[in-house]
Image (cartoon, rainbow, N blue to C red):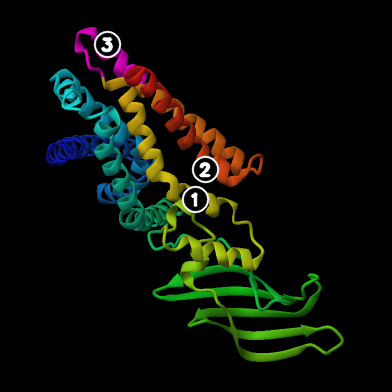
Amino acid sequence: MKINNLISKYLIRSFLVNFIAVLFMILGIILMFEVIDLLRRVSDRSDVGFDFVLQMAFTKLPRTLEMVFPFVVMIAAMMTFWKFSKSNEFVVIRAAGVSVWGFLYPVLFTAFAIGVINIILLNPIASQMYEIHETLDYRFKTKNPKAMLFNSKGLWIREAINNDETMVFHAKSLRQVNANLLLNKITLIETDKTSRPIRRLEAFAGELNNGFFDLADIKIYTAGKETETISNLKYPTSLNIERIKENFIEPEAISFWDLPETIRFYELSGFSVQKHYMRYLTLLVSPFLLCAMIFVAAVFSLRPNTRKGGVILMIVGGVTTGFTVYFLSQVIYAFGLNDYIPIWLAVLSPSLITILFSVSLLLHLEDG
């Protein structure tokens, strides 16, 4: 047990060193290409400085890294396994009575832990930074340095009042001033459970504030009654600025911890939650995808006899397999997003198939 503990610590330390090295190398490459691409885009814009380019590049970096994160883990594992094979440490460990599964366990555990840390700690930071990037990109496109993401886009949203009534809200334009959200030309329609209109409110302007829409210059239309005109009205709502922003940003810009509440809100309001639900499940199973990449790396890198060579084959085979897994996972993800296959199958199948296929190859190569 003591020998196994020492081997485990040695394996984990070697893998983490390679992981950090590969991570920073990939981060540098991504940042360099992002900056070059942004400099090309702003070449004809005298109002955009280099500091704005760096802000956009840095805030997009976590989102881009998330897409290649499984490859970072796979490359780090390949480097670790190849080092052990080349130095014959793998042969010595096997001779000490440690099976290939005992050898892989510490690395699998570390990769899974990295995946969990990525979900609970790094993802909220990455989501916030990606939201900032989308706002910066919107300011770049609109040439307005103070524009918010949803400025002048208009808003359509639906909210459940209770089990029998629903509210449909429309504002022709909206903008954020400090912590306040200002709305113009508002239409609010209350409907029953059969979607039949009960009451309609039209307001010249309004403001979202502390769980209420503060409406001004309102006309109220109710079936069978005369039109009522009032100057001010506080209309209760569960909406807030963050919730409204989520109508204008991708699910990738919403934190893992905020996704369940967002999904519940959209379900109650009658909106589709397909993209948000798939995003949530994808994050949940991401540690298993990292473990799948460890198995892929083991298939191509764990060789007890280094005299067979094949370094080029290892690199090409591992990278090609990794890209194939990623491409197929995106195709299956699109099938699930469009309801061609169940969501849980679209999310789980890439990792499960990769793990089962890799384990079968390892059984053949190592124990067969």
| Rendered location of residue 185, percent (x, y) | 63, 74
Q: Is residue 250 above or below residue 319?
A: below
Q: Is residue 201 above or below residue 60?
A: below
Give the prevailing secondary structure in the magenta stretch. Answer: helix
- Residues at circles 2 and 1 in contact by the CB criterion of under 8 Å: yes
Q: Which residue is mark 2?
A: 347
Please name the amino acid that badge 2 sits on. Answer: Val
Name which residue lies at 47% across and 36% down: 352
Please report the bounds of the magenta region as a residue range.
303-317
Q: Please give left or right for residue 1 compared with residue 142 in the image.
A: left
- Measured Cα–Cα span from mark 1 to mark 3: 38 Å
Q: Please give left or right for residue 358 compared with residue 157 in the image.
A: left
Q: Is residue 181 above or below residue 295?
A: below
User: Who comes first in sequence, dot 2 or dot 1?
Assistant: 1
Q: In the picture, residue 272 is in which quadrant?
A: bottom right
| Rendered location of residue 108, percent (x, y) | 30, 39
SS state under label 1: helix
Any magenta on residue 310?
yes
Q: Which residue is mark 3?
A: 310
Name which residue lies at 32% across and 50% down: 118
| Rendered location of residue 99, percent (x, y) | 26, 28
> 352 or 202: nearer the eye?
352
Which quadrant of the rendered structure holds the N terminus? top left
Any magenta on residue 138?
no
In the displayed image of the protein, which residue is found farthest to the right? Answer: 224
SS state under label 2: helix
User: Who comes first in sequence, dot 2 or dot 3?
Assistant: 3
Which quadrant of the rendered structure holds the C terminus? top left
| Rendered location of residue 347, percent (x, y) | 52, 43
Please name the amino acid that badge 1 sits on. Answer: Leu
- Measured Cα–Cα span from mark 2 to mark 3: 34 Å
Q: Which residue is mark 1?
A: 281
